[in-house]
Amino acid sequence: MYKEDIIRALDPVAFSRHIGIEPDPWQAEVLRYEGKRMLLNCSRQSGKSTTTAMKALHRGVYTPGSLILLVSPSLRQSQELFRKTKEHYGKMENKLSLLEDNKLSMTLSNNSRIVSLPGDQATVRGFSSVSLILEDESAQVKDEFYQAILPMLIINDGQYIAMSTPYGKRGHFFEEWTNGGSEWQKIAITAEMCPRITPEKLEQQRRSLGDMFFRQEYMCEFVETEDSSFYYDLVQRAFSEAVQPLF
Ligand SMILES: Nc1ncnc2c1ncn2[C@@H]1O[C@H](COP(=O)(O)OP(=O)(O)O)[C@@H](O)[C@H]1O
Ligand SMILES: [Mg+2]
């Protein structure tokens, strides 16, 4: 190994720079994170997919034999994350060759695999000893699916990183964000914190989306969407003994 390669192996941020992407400070934190559970509640277009795809590739390249799963509500969205991983791979110098290469997955010559999956339970049975699970659009992934994938991390003591914009006050992303214990590393990045989103563009979005969706998509807020069949706050209040019943 060359000296540069050793540095890239040890530091995913150096690897990202080698691919041509200078990570934002929070992105560097994600790349270097070695804990087991992370939640990224970050604005649309802040760079969630770009960053986690980089982490997936780094893991695959420098941890031989690792299995990395890309999950999301649909195969199309998982493939999108996979496409970004491959794009990064394409920019590597002296890249490892591929033993398998298709639209859904790739296997590197060191036997690491990166696989994109649809968000239903049937497809994930059969995977075990997973090194890293990336869950994109996590707030819209079914809770049953989340419960099905977590056990796959036990054997390898693998990492789970969920990324999303909020989607109402319900589901595992919201629950872990709100009530998850100290094992969860949480990062919130609003659009205002993203150096690539100008205040002008953001103002435009606020006007066209309306206040509620703007807060959800760009300001990391778990607001109730208009079509939600129940209202979390109302339910919470109904269960809270401290508050007088509404009816
Ligand atoms: N650190 C960075 N430097 C330059 N461009 C970036 C960086 N992070 C993200 N981008 C760009 O920002 C855009 C949105 O990134 P993406 O990962 O799709 O965001 P998200 O998944 O959060 O919606 C993409 O065009 C991506 O290339
Ligand atoms: Mg994305």
Image (cartoon, grey):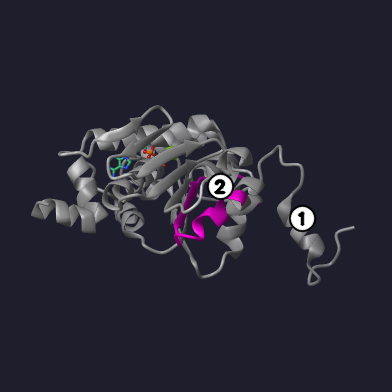
Instruction: Please identify the quarter of the rendering in which residue 124 is found.
Output: top right
Q: Quadrant of the C terminus?
A: bottom right
Q: Is residue 229 left or right of residue 163?
A: right
Report if residue 196 lies within the magenta region: no
The magenta stretch spans which residues? 148-169
Instruction: Please identify the quarter of the rendering in which residue 212 is found.
Output: top right
Q: Position of residue 110 (x, y in %)?
A: 28, 45
* Residue at position x 50%, y 29% in the image: 76
In what element is the residue under mark 1?
Answer: helix
Image height of 167 relative to 106, above or below: below
Q: Position of residue 178 (x, y in %)?
A: 59, 61
Q: CA distance from mark 1 to mark 2?
A: 19 Å
Q: Residue 166 — which label?
A: 2
Name the residue beneath numbered marker 1.
234
Q: Amino acid at mark 2?
A: Pro
Q: Is residue 78 left or right of residue 64?
A: right
Which residue is at the front of the view, 33 or 152? 152
